[in-house]
Amino acid sequence: MDIIEQFLRKVSYKFPKGYPDINDPKDKDLLFELTNDLLQEQDNDFDSLIKTAFEGNVPSAKGRYQIQSGPFKISPEDKEAFLKLFKIKPNAGVGNGEVSLYWLFNTSGGSAAENRGGSAADLVINGKQVEVKSYPKHNTKITLGKFKDDTESRTIITRLFGVQNLVGALRDAGGREFVSEVSFNINDLKNSFDKVFEIEQILSDPKVEPILSQFAPFNELKKEVNYLLNLVEGGDSQDLAKSTMATLATNKISLKPGAGNYILNLLTKDPFDIYIHKVPDNIKESIMSKTYEQVSKASSVSSAEIQFNFALFD
């Protein structure tokens, strides 16, 4: 299959007939637009950008580099070239330092490939997925993105907060206890599980159950509580809160950069101050091995996006 056929197969779904009809003016215009986009993208690949930056005379890195957990040091001889490429990027979707790292590994005996779009990490370096970040501190929460596609976690969290908010509405007409899946932390999860266990105990009380079972809303509430508790692992409210947060983080981190891969952070104010965090092979097991307080400090959800401190794995 030649490159033209590969391109046409890739874009065929964009055309009403499933292929570009050159006799159709609209298809013809769309084909020219897609072809132009492809040519632009090829002109903006990392190799082209690096070649342009050095006016065709691309230097080789003098140091030898490995991807491993801990501080990442750049050889003094390579700093000038690294800094020259630091802010060069093909588009806004690529972060500072990605082109620099691509050059550094490809010219020093290693290998690096660019990844653009989708759920893949930013770079593949020496066969490992590497997500590149630039935060002001290495030991800080990093935004992992939204979790709207994580049906496992959302099913638990939505039902959990549903029970919590129902109890809160009954006890507090002002709604001060309302919890949203858009912004919460592990303590919100724990408090909600406390309410679930409290409701379960009330609805199962032999003195109360015969009376409440006569009313459909209480039967539905009991079903909801039992269904929720069947979704989660056993333990007290603190254990369940930690497990729920661990599942949420694990499902996201498993996609990018993935188990056994890396997060590389370049300090915002100093591009040469670099630290690499390694993601463990068993992400959830590693998180669950930490104390409740450690997980509490390392994770939260804000504006529907997961925040996680990868220093938890160090």
Image (cartoon, helix red, strand yellow):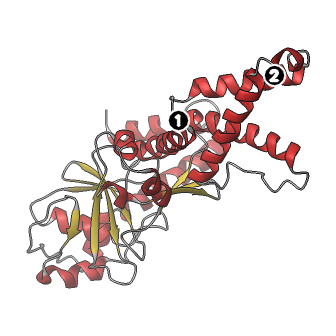
Residue 31 position, x and y percent, is: 54, 47
Q: Quadrant of the C terminus?
A: bottom left
Mark 2: few/some/many CA within 10 Å (<14, 14-19, 20+): few
Residue at 86% across, 46% down: 171
Q: Nearer the viewer, residue 16 or 282?
A: 282
* Secondary structure category for the residue under label 1: helix
Residue at 41% across, 51% down: 291
Of label 1 and label 2, which has the lower sequence position? Answer: 1
Residue 263 position, x and y percent, is: 33, 58
Q: Which of 23 and 207 is in front in this view?
A: 207
Q: Kindly tell me whether residue 211 is visible in this rendering.
A: yes
Residue 150 position, x and y percent, is: 56, 38
Q: Kindly tell me whether residue 47 is visible in this rendering.
A: no
Give, as a three-letter code, the residue at label 2: Glu
Q: Which residue does the numbered mark 2 point to in the structure image? A: 220
Quick check: 277 above or below 195? below
Residue at 27% across, 45% down: 260
Residue 112 position, x and y percent, is: 23, 57
Among the 4 quarters of the image, the one containing residue 237: top right
Quick check: 203 above or below 266? above
Give, as a three-letter code, the residue at label 1: Ser
Quick check: 24 above or below 295? above
Q: Label for residue 12?
A: 1
49 relative to 39 in the view: left or right: left
Q: Label for residue 47?
A: none
